[in-house]
Amino acid sequence: MAGSSKKAGSASVVKKTNTPNERKGLPLKTKTVVLTESGYRCAVPTCRNILALDMHHMYQVAHGGGDDPSNLIALCPTCHALYHRGTISADAIYAYKSMLVAISRAFDVDAVDKLLFLNSLAKDALIISGDGVLRFDRLIAAGLAGFDPKANNGNLIVTYSINISDKGRLLIEAWKSGDRDRLKQTMAGPLPGIASDGTLPPATQAAPKTKSKK
């Protein structure tokens, strides 16, 4: 039966429910924190839908999961259903959450979408002014993007190309893969908000496994 537990030695094996069983009436403040973290978009990097969003409990309600923002992630109804059908794994959900927490703490709420946008472009496809470069300044400082001068009309009109760096591309690929180990390895190094060994924010760590009652 979905959502039931089977004993395996001294520990219980908790099954994932097949359909969403979300707690109703979450405080507006909690929803705002989670939605702001994801930029009011679905947290799945290959989706990023903005039309409708659910509050998904990573450690499920059926198993005692709480309503703290660290246990919640914004998913569109389609991705939410894909999770409960097993198409999107629980490990991938934690990887998506880790990326959002790390980037939003290190930069600003739209940094993730800026990286996804740059990742979708061909080299030198984005040509902007000097003022435009400043919109990517923190990503550039972190080595996730770079810029090169393209034109200088006697210092009257100066333009630059903005491109995602190799480091930025690896980070996006690790995020999309939903592999927490790969994401942690890619984040290792001088990325603001991340420990030097690549340790992810503690708020994204998985909830402890449920122990069986004696």
Image (tube, helix red, strand yellow):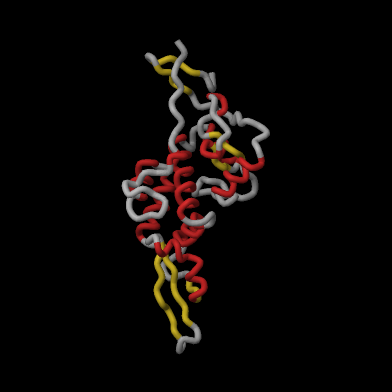
In the displayed structure, would residue 94 be above or below residue 99?
above
Q: In which quarter of the image is residue 80?
A: top right
Q: In which quarter of the image is the N terminus?
A: top right
Residue 100 screen position, x and y as percent: 49, 48
In the displayed structure, would residue 22 be above or below residue 99?
above
Residue 162 or residue 18, whichever sits in front? 162
In the displayed structure, would residue 58 be above or below residue 137?
above
For image coordinates 54% across by 25% down, the residue present is 64
129 relative to 141 in the view: left or right? right
Residue 76 screen position, x and y as percent: 59, 43
42 relative to 147 in the view: left or right? right
Residue 35 or residue 48, whichever sits in front? 35
Residue 111 screen position, x and y as percent: 50, 57
Q: Quadrant of residue 177?
A: top left
For image coordinates 43% across by 65% down, the residue present is 122
Q: In which quarter of the image is the C terminus?
A: top left
Residue 44 screen position, x and y as percent: 51, 45
Residue 143 or residue 151, whichever sits in front? 143
Q: Count up the numbered dots.
A: 0
Looking at this view, name the residue that lies furthest to the bottom: 154
